[in-house]
Image (cartoon, coloured by chain):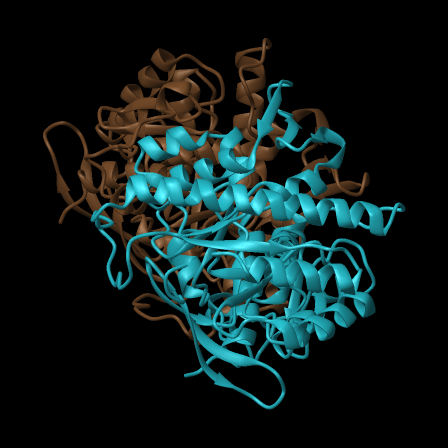
Chain colours: A cyan, B brown
Amino acid sequence: MSKSHFKELKRYKNGNRSGILKTRRGPVKTPFFMPCASRGSVKGLQPSQIIDSGTQVLLANAYHLHLQPGEKVIKKLGGLHTFSGWQGPILTDSGGFQVFSLAKARKVTEEGVYFKNLASGGEVLITPEESMQIQFDLGSDIIMAFDDVTGLSPTGRTRSKEAMERTHRWLVRCITEFKKLTKNSFKGRTLKGVKGTTLRNKPLLFGIVQGGLDKNLRKKSLEFVQSQEVDGIAIGGLAVGETRKEMYDMLNFLAPFYDPARARYLMGVGEPADMRYAIERGIDIFDCVLPTRNGRHGQVWITGDKRLNLNNLKYANDRGPIDSKCDCHTCKTGYSRAFLRHLYKVGDPLAGSLATTHNLRYLARLCEEYQQT
Amino acid sequence: MSKSHFKELKRYKNGNRSGILKTRRGPVKTPFFMPCASRGSVKGLQPSQIIDSGTQVLLANAYHLHLQPGEKVIKKLGGLHTFSGWQGPILTDSGGFQVFSLAKARKVTEEGVYFKNLASGGEVLITPEESMQIQFDLGSDIIMAFDDVTGLSPTGRTRSKEAMERTHRWLVRCITEFKKLTKNSFKGRTLKGVKGTTLRNKPLLFGIVQGGLDKNLRKKSLEFVQSQEVDGIAIGGLAVGETRKEMYDMLNFLAPFYDPARARYLMGVGEPADMRYAIERGIDIFDCVLPTRNGRHGQVWITGDKRLNLNNLKYANDRGPIDSKCDCHTCKTGYSRAFLRHLYKVGDPLAGSLATTHNLRYLARLCEEYQQT
């Protein structure tokens, strides 16, 4: 990390801050939310529709894209941006979270993680080095370190400490590999076809803080990650099943210790109330499956962070939009709750696309309220 | 039929003609193809995307919309145009075809057709009068008579003759009901919110010719339908399993007998080669599930009326668009065959939307080649 890629523009009384994250595909206003494009696409949406929702950055997943279509295929086709048509910045998840979410299908060793390839039945080893290589091949703009994610195991502190320490050792290996890859790849080369590129054409690297619900471990982990050459600090291992109070406690606890010169990313959080709480504790970046997955199943947010289920019979005759105060494409165009309910009822994927558009706009607008205009 | 709603602009040497069908929602250039919006929407596409493909008219289905959400609900919500957001003309199928396509779930009597409501388990009776009422309530611009559709039954001519005669008796009942409904509904009223309306604000009514593969019956049926007060002539009961040669023979046979002052609609045909053949035998209008259903499953047409299956492994590294000569949104935007294949592979409904857009444009462009510019 030769220079800071994050600029804090303003710090507010209630704890939040507005800033700019400088990526090789242009600057991004913080705070921001990243929709999941795990397999390279936000299900049912074209890039133009994603941009239209106010989305600035997409999250793609190294593990899923490694299995299908494979990072080498994507690299050959010009990288994930050319492949998917999304020209904004892309952050790639390292595959570490899949150690947790696909827990039954893996084995963790010091070397890396053995996944079961659920498609082929074979076994896949992903090491920190390979995760870097995959994310590099994909053409990621923000690369995540490969971490050892633990849930709330009954073994408590022991497993948390072990996972944290392994995450730290893996971070060092990630940084070494990242430097090797960037050194080989960016000797005076410019990134073709990217407008507004203002920085050296290297991706950013974010480290991940672990430590479960143990405050001492979390503080140690944050200090360690911040001592390393990383461009951003991610808080991993929260939003994995703990109570809201436990998560909030940890966010409060960590708030005073963040390096102001680096972006902070709370992984896996996307419930509006939680995002507001976290933003007011200094968090800049979020991702979550909620707006997309919920949208596909008929759940949408409306003003006041309330949820509404469009499958509900009571909307069968409702000619109003999802939210009359919303400026998303779906609400502005005038699609009624009654029509959307009908689309879910008959299994038309247009329902999911329209609701996803609305949900993404909801979270983008939430963030915009906190951004410097 | 007080005056003709079809204007033949030009007749060409090879048998085709270009014309204008005047609907209460403005004029439509012929020949044209109607995508299936059976349940009020073209699966996965917004109205703006459908217009963008060059589509002029949608086909919706009285039977399906009667069951869900019900024509009374749609009427209460302002009609199918307001409900779905599609502002162009809509033709509604009468439900007659479902007698054939849902054959196991029905019983035909002189009164009408008993359908099994597959959703509720109950029985639904649709009579010619009720079909008119349903289409009226939906706000259809082109109403189809309720017909008795037969497949290629082993009983042959007998069943064809019976079905044809019943179709004729039902047409008379449809016309009577249609007159009653239009008389009550259009006493000097104008259609709200419709731009470009140049005619009396009544929907059009099309009669349907039956007669199976028997030329004598077909000729009789055509003469009967043309003797009635209908605005257009539909050829039903073809494209139901007969050979291509049998269908082509019938189209050739019927060509000299059409009334030039009325539009001719070949129901259920949408294979490009068949459309060209039919257009050159004087057909003006088409509908078919092929471009939408095939699109959702990965089948697309490319120049030369060839089919390509995007699921095929050989496209995994293909950076080209579906068809480099195509001007559809999908091809122009640059979505590659490789990306589309990937989307099918991971089950993203965006695949179906993008391929449907391409297929609809393919058929719209095919028609445009025959239209007067």
User: Quick one: which residue is furthest to the right in this view?
Assistant: A154
Q: Is B123 or A256 nearer to us in this picture?
A: A256
Question: On the rendered image, what quadrant is the N terminus of chain B found in?
Answer: bottom left
x, y percent for residue A84: 38, 44
Q: Is B270 or B243 nearer to us in this picture?
A: B270
Q: Is B221 or A31 nearer to us in this picture?
A: A31
Q: Is residue B318 left or right of residue A311?
A: left
x, y percent for residue B222: 38, 31
Q: In which quarter of the view is residue A373 placed?
A: bottom left
Asked if B190 appears above or below A172 in the picture, the reply is below
Residue for point 35% across, 26% down? B271
Residue for point 78% across, 71% down? A249
Q: In which quarter of the view is residue A163 placed?
A: top right
Q: Is residue A360 visible?
A: yes
Asked if B255 appears above or below A215 in the picture, the reply is above
Q: Is residue B127 visible?
A: no
Q: Is residue B61 left or right of residue A205?
A: right
User: Quick one: which residue is furthest to the left in this view?
Assistant: B13
Q: In which quarter of the view is residue A113 placed?
A: top right
x, y percent for residue B151: 55, 20
Q: Is B130 or A346 nearer to us in this picture?
A: A346
User: Quick one: which residue is furthest to the top in this view?
Assistant: B154
Q: Is residue B128 left or right of residue B326?
A: right
x, y percent for residue B255: 26, 26
